[in-house]
Image: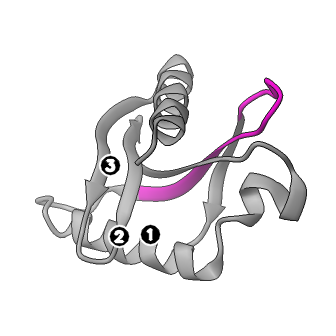
């Protein structure tokens, strides 16, 4: 991962912590891919995809979370859940960071598994 990606994930983690979430894992790697951040929002386990784009060309950060990417995230989340004793409530969020010092956009329930 490049420095820009690391910075984006660090900014996203700090932002989510300020919103009351607790980061439990960063860059979880599984057989099918990687989950940028895993957090707890109360009793809910949150799988977070962080996307940074310098501009909104080609749809911006949100458009970069393709169907194939969502499938990889879902499969990787299932692999993570298999390591737990019980399956908590879960959701998939996205944290989007645009260019030009634009505000962070947090999309709760960005997609269903």
Q: Label 3, label 1: how many angstroms apart (C-alpha)?
A: 12 Å
- Taking the image as shown, residue 59 lies to the left or right of residue 17, namely right
- Taking the image as shown, residue 75 lies to the left or right of residue 83, namely right
| Residue 74: % across, % down | 43, 73
Circle 1 Cα neighbour tier, 10 Å, few/some/many (<14 / 14–19 / ≥20)? many
| Residue 92: % across, % down | 52, 58
Q: Residue at (83%, 28%) from the top-left corner?
A: 100
Location of residue 26 (image quadrant): top left
Query: 4 or 79: nearer the eye?
Result: 4
Residue 66 versus residue 6 in the image, above or below: below
Circle 2 Cα neighbour tier, 10 Å, few/some/many (<14 / 14–19 / ≥20)? some
Q: Residue at (42%, 58%) from the top-left corner?
A: 90
Q: Label 3, label 2: how many angstroms apart (C-alpha)?
A: 10 Å
Asked if labels 1 and 2 touch by Cβ distance under 8 angstroms, the answer is yes
Image: magenta residue range: 90-104
Does 99 appear in magenta? yes
Q: Label 2, label 1: how many angstroms apart (C-alpha)?
A: 7 Å
Between circles 3 and 1, the one closer to the viewer is: 3
Question: In the image as oriented, which residue stretches furthest toward the top?
Answer: 18
Q: Residue 73: which numbered mark, if any? A: 1
Query: 74 or 104: nearer the eye?
Result: 104
Residue under pointer 2: 33
Circle 3 Cα neighbour tier, 10 Å, few/some/many (<14 / 14–19 / ≥20)? some
| Residue 97: % across, % down | 69, 38
Which SS class for mark 2? loop
Residue 11 versus residue 36 in the image, above or below: above
Residue under pointer 3: 27
Which SS class for mark 3? strand
């Amino acid at each position: 991962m490049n420095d820009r990606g690391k910075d984006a994930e660090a900014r996203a983690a700090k932002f989510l912590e300020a919103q009351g979430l607790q980061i439990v894992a960063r860059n979880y790697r599984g057989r099918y891919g990687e989950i940028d951040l895993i957090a707890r929002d109360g009793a809910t386990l949150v799988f977070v995809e962080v996307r940074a784009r310098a501009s909104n060309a080609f749809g911006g950060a949100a458009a970069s979370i393709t169907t194939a990417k969502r499938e990889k995230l879902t499969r990787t989340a299932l692999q993570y859940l298999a390591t737990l004793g019980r399956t908590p409530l879960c959701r998939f969020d996205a944290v989007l960071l645009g260019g030009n010092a634009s505000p962070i956009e947090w999309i709760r329930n960005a997609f269903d598994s």
